[in-house]
Amino acid sequence: MPQPLDSRFPKAVRELWASLSADVVWLHGRWIIYRQLFGTNKERVELLNESAGTVTWILQNLLLHDVQLSLSKIGDPAGGGGRQNLTLRRLQLALKDAGEHEVADKMEPLLAAFESSCEKVRHRRNKWIAHNDLLTKLSARATPLAGPSRDEIEGALVALREVMNCVELHYTESQTAYEHFVMNEDGEHLVAALARAKRYRELVAEGGIPRDDFRRRFPGGV
């Protein structure tokens, strides 16, 4: 069920703000999950690979691509006519159109910093994540394409939060800690489940649990 729009924001941007804020929250959520699974310690990565190596490889790439796509999209131009985009530049333009020039002007250097932090991300999006640029894809067969560093993504997210919190602080006198978004089930839950499954396999191998225990408990499979 959609949350009510925040009346502290100008009416002209309330829906824009709500949608952008939700996108930024879940962008951080996906990056948090990525870090939990693949950026905590090598033991977790080994557990994931041992449990389902192919799925782990696919999931890692999908999350990393998704984060880069999301950063690129939110930093795209506002667009115009029948091709308008839900982006930070659209929010800034809507604020200007609503006469909110003070906050729109405050956004400008922060937007420029965010766009600068996403230059490599946007290049990857345009060349090989969202599009199959011929020369890029063919050259990658000889020289694998370099993915983003963790610092690169973290830097882009910091810059994104600066833009969002500049606007929110202006209207609400508060800020959102996007980087501390808490989910009911996240990467920690998956890692714990896989660790328990590994221990189950060990107990079966040690004779502590009958070898047909799983088949008897789930005769139809899972």
Image (cartoon, rainbow, N blue to C red):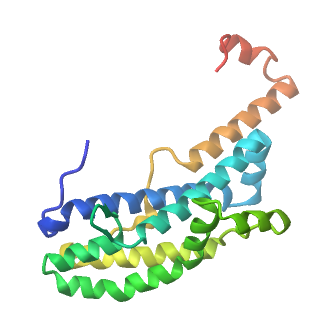
Asked whether, in this view, residue 106 is left or right of residue 111, the answer is left
The total number of labels drawn is: 0
Q: Is residue 151 above or below residue 210?
A: below
Image coordinates for residue 150, horizontal then vertical, percent: 63, 71
Q: Nearer the viewer, residue 42 or 163?
A: 163
Q: Quadrant of the N terminus?
A: top left
Question: Does residue 80 appear anywhere in the picture?
Answer: yes
Residue lying at 22% horizontally and 79% vertically, measured from the top left: 170
Image coordinates for residue 183, horizontal then vertical, percent: 45, 50
Give the quadrant of residue 90. Answer: bottom left
Image coordinates for residue 119, horizontal then vertical, percent: 55, 79
Q: Is residue 8 above or below residue 37?
A: below
Q: Nearer the viewer, residue 49 or 207?
A: 49
Residue lying at 33% horizontally and 75% vertically, measured from the top left: 89
Q: Nearer the viewer, residue 63 or 93?
A: 93
Q: Is residue 218 above or below residue 26?
A: above
Asked whether, in this view, residue 123 is left or right of residue 216, the answer is left
Q: Quadrant of the C terminus?
A: top right
Image coordinates for residue 219, horizontal then vertical, percent: 68, 10
Q: Nearer the viewer, residue 127 or 120?
A: 127
Question: Does residue 35 appear anywhere in the picture?
Answer: no
